[in-house]
Amino acid sequence: MSIYGGIDLGGTKIQAVVVDAQSSPLATARRATPTAGGPADVAAEMQKTLREAAAAAELEPHALAGVGVGSPGRIEGANVTSASNLPDWEGTFPLGDVLASALGCRVVLGNDVRVATEAEFHLGAGRPYDSLLGVFWGTGVGGALILAGETWLGRGGAGEIGHVVVEMDGARCTCGRRGCMEAYAGRAAMELHARHLHEEKGRGTDLFKLMKQHQRTRLTSGVWARALEHGDKLAIEVLDRAVSALGAGIASVVNVLDVEGVVLGGGLGVRLGHPYAERIAGAMQPHLFADSQPPQLHVAALGDLGGAIGASLLVRSEG
Amino acid sequence: MSIYGGIDLGGTKIQAVVVDAQSSPLATARRATPTAGGPADVAAEMQKTLREAAAAAELEPHALAGVGVGSPGRIEGANVTSASNLPDWEGTFPLGDVLASALGCRVVLGNDVRVATEAEFHLGAGRPYDSLLGVFWGTGVGGALILAGETWLGRGGAGEIGHVVVEMDGARCTCGRRGCMEAYAGRAAMELHARHLHEEKGRGTDLFKLMKQHQRTRLTSGVWARALEHGDKLAIEVLDRAVSALGAGIASVVNVLDVEGVVLGGGLGVRLGHPYAERIAGAMQPHLFADSQPPQLHVAALGDLGGAIGASLLVRSEG
């Protein structure tokens, strides 16, 4: 029986999984994504993570039928260019070849958000549907579309829901543009906004104390979740703003595409879970043109393993 | 050789066309859409318009191989429900049967914006592309999508680009919602905004004088075009606001779908033409995620006949 590997390369964490022929996880491993260095350092951390997962499954990496990688940035064959939210990765790096050589097995690259959406479509919350919008609420806000059962690529760049405009001349996005949904809802933008309110506007918050207590260097999804549990007013306010933006942006896409289902994943989506999915559905409602027939909104059923499991599907479809 | 009829039912005008087997117009006719009365009055005006076109082609309507109708509202078989921007048409009206009985030939109904987009795709500016976004800038802002060569319907309601949110908590739309693209760019919303600035804010403008001079009861596309020629400052300001909203909204859809082409039609789109298409492309640019690869933006090549010609295609595809 063939065993496959999958790696999800995120802006915050690297998640690896080893799965059986039914895509059930046999072992997993996770490491923080390097915040300094460059693509080669990220690749080194990725192969360590995959090795840990393989070791936990009592396998050598070269015994795997292949390893799929879900990556941000532009993917062309074995190369990744302009991977946003990763250190010094504006240029092109031969990630596929570097990993294949280090692991001793076949490596196939795919877009991180697309493979996670395909995992939910085939194995998770999207199974009942023929058309699905995947929204990955994490460091940025990624999106992918499945229409009539197939991932819609457009000219190659489809799915950039994070850069749907929710406010003309609005907040500056981490991409440099103005008014993008991600400028309000991305974890990176939320952290900048919280820091601005705290440090420059003198607003009180426990967010940065919690970050230090938990030995984080960023406001991770876990830090946000804990601040909410503590009733931190600034955290609540910044998240309310994110929910409003997600509601407007997702509703806009639904008005145009009228998909059957929406799956909410990503670090924040999975961590904040069902109560926040309900709030986002509520924020969508006043903007939906067919408001008597909202699409179903689900939290990603594969949780934060979806990206890595989806990546492992890449080796199969090309196998 | 079969001859076909097509009727485009718009919020401002009813356009009829009689075409040959190659979809070339043999004759056309146009009447104003009734602003009072109800669906039966609109239907009566529609059959008069088609009769005029048929007479100009020296034909009786019953000699046509069929008449296609592009209509706003929800279309179910021969019925049209909730046709926005038409008088007293919130309920269901059997438009197809009424027209078939009055004209003595087969009548097929379709969505106005979808048939116009299909006409541009098969016969007009969209011919080079496999994926196309149709944006119809008129009384409202309608949209339709062709993906991989086929109209994308979603669950039946896809294409509502006018209700993409460009400003959270923004201007009130004629649909009742807030911040929709149409709230800034629809001709009806632009007229309300211009009237508000003129009557309540005391801003000077020749828009309403031009409207009366040309015996109009609304600020038609022609009135806007003339005001622009006169350098009317308020008209320029309201149109600038519309262009910004169209740029943000269309760019949002392009970021998600990455279509090859965009066709700009509708009363305002066709009347203001290429210079405004260029301005809208310019307003899209700062919001495009793949800004080095903008989609091609064209003015509808079939002009204001596209809707009626597209409607005539309905009789063929069902013929």
Image (spheres, coloured by chain):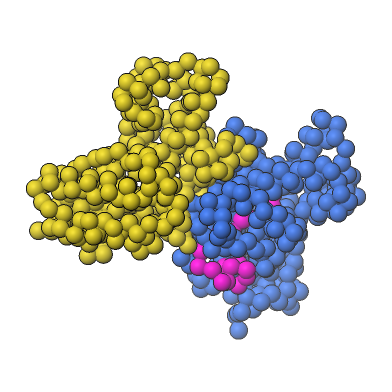
Chain colours: A yellow, B blue
Q: Does residue B77 lie above or below A8 as drawn?
A: below
Residue A174 image offset from top left, x and y in percent:
51, 40
Front-lying residue, B84 or A20? A20
| Image point (41%, 22%), residue name | A208
Q: Is residue A149 visible?
A: no
| Side (left or right) of B223 relative to A195 | right
- Confirm whether the magenta stretch covers residue B142: no
Residue at horizontal 51 percent and vertical 29 percent from the top = A193
Magenta-colored span: B120-140
Vertical placement of residue B84 versus B201, above or below: below
* Side of B140 where A12 appears, left or right: left
Q: Is residue B131 magenta?
A: yes
Measuring from the top left, give residue A79's x and y in whole percent: 37, 60
Residue at x 49%, y 31% (from the top left corner): A192
Residue A42 seen: yes
Image coords of residue A82 (percent x, y): 44, 52
Residue A46, position in %: x, y? 27, 48
Q: What count of labels does the image hold?
A: 0
Q: Which quarter of the rendered picture does the N terminus of chain B lie within?
A: bottom right
Q: Residue at x 60, y 79 (%)?
A: B21
Q: Residue lying furthest front in this view?
A: A37
Farthest residue, direction bottom: B1
